[in-house]
Image (tube, rainbow, N blue to C red):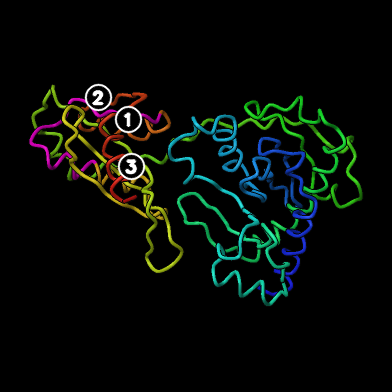
Amino acid sequence: MPLPVWQELLVAANAFRTAQPWTWLDDADIFAVIDDDGRPWFPSVLGSAGLVFGLALHRGESGLRFLAETVPALEDSPRDAAFLQDALLLEWGAKQDLAPEDLSVLAALGHRPRSRERHAWPSFRSHSPGWFPWHFDEAEARAFTAGTRALLACAELARGQPDFFASCALDGAVLPTVTMAATRQGPLQAAQIEWRRWLLPPLPSPPAPTVPPTWRALAERAKNSQCVLEFDIFHAMIPSSDGGRPYFPRLGLMVDGKTGYIYTMELASPDRAWADLVTIVWEKALTALRDRPAVIVIRRPEWVMALQPLADRLDIRLELADELPFIDEARDSMERHLGG
């Protein structure tokens, strides 16, 4: 990335640190800022709790969905939420926390904080669903620079109005909305803010898997009316890499709903199609069984439409449940083992 782009990014980050907007905003005080290409970004200021100081610039619908699911009640956030963040993140921290690549760029930019100055070293990372946090590319650096400047203009407006967010409810997605262009025209005025309701559509159903011709033999097997399976796909907590950017593998799991026996477990990168992963997991599990199961239990309503053709082809009933106890037990066990 060209050094001048890095320089502009660092200038914006330093302006954010100097302003310290976390002293009057918290991470639930969300603006919507529209860039010059019409794309929405949702900045969230970090630091009011005194632990992490920085700015998360959440991207589009997926960024807003992440905020809606995690900010209102962190303790009740979906288990996979951390793997679904779609944002550009700045964090001010200690020098020893930075990667060598970060230190090299900062040295080239002449960044030299005072000795023992706290939270004086910036880290910039791009978060994309399923992928390990990574360095900004040039487009992301330019977007974050513009977003940071827009956020500071918005934050300054809110600073003078203690009840600014009183009418804002994140769960209803009513957010103060402004164009980045407006924030570049001088001090932002209240009249330039539109209180817009950002409604999130239901999660779309993923593309339905194609039923393989080889499943005819599986469909002809006798059905065991007592056999119930649990099926889910989730992210493994240990990153992996195929030589490029590391990622958190998706793990497809099919287990016995009465004993917890694991019939199959399959890992996949973010690039691998969901439908392909489903087909492989189902085929391996059902091949391992002597009889067809009567029921396969899932917990994600948005999957029903995509999985129903597979279940129909095999004459297996698909059921929705809030909990998959044996899937969760297996996942807990794997995470305890991998976490040491």
Which type of secondary structure does the marked residue at label 1 adopt? Answer: strand
Q: Position of residue 155 (x, y in %)?
A: 80, 43
Please tell me whether residue 298 is drawn above or below residue 86 in the rendered image.
above
Judge whether residue 132 is colored magenta.
Answer: no
Badge nearest the viewer, 3 or 1: 1
Which type of secondary structure does the marked residue at label 3 adopt? Answer: loop
Judge whether residue 297 is colored magenta.
Answer: yes
Q: Are marks 3 and 2 in contact (CB under 8 Å)?
A: no
Mark number displayed over residue 133? none
Q: Gap in Å between the C-alphas at discs 3 and 2?
A: 17 Å
Magenta region: 282-300
- Dot 3 corresponds to which residue? 209
User: Residue at (27%, 49%) from the top-left corner?
Assistant: 266
Which is nearer the N-term, disc 3 or disc 1? 3
Q: Is residue 200 left or right of residue 161?
A: left
Badge nearest the viewer, 3 or 2: 2
Mark 2 belongs to which amino acid? Arg
- Dot 1 corresponds to which residue? 298
Q: Gap in Å between the C-alphas at discs 1 and 2?
A: 11 Å
Q: Gap in Å between the C-alphas at discs 3 and 1?
A: 16 Å
User: Residue at (59%, 43%) from the top-left corner?
Assistant: 63
- Dot 2 corresponds to which residue? 317
Circle 2 packing at 10 Å, graded few (<14), some (14-19), many (20+), is some
Q: Are marks 1 and 2 in contact (CB under 8 Å)?
A: no
Please tell me whether residue 146 is drawn above or below residue 98 in the rendered image.
above
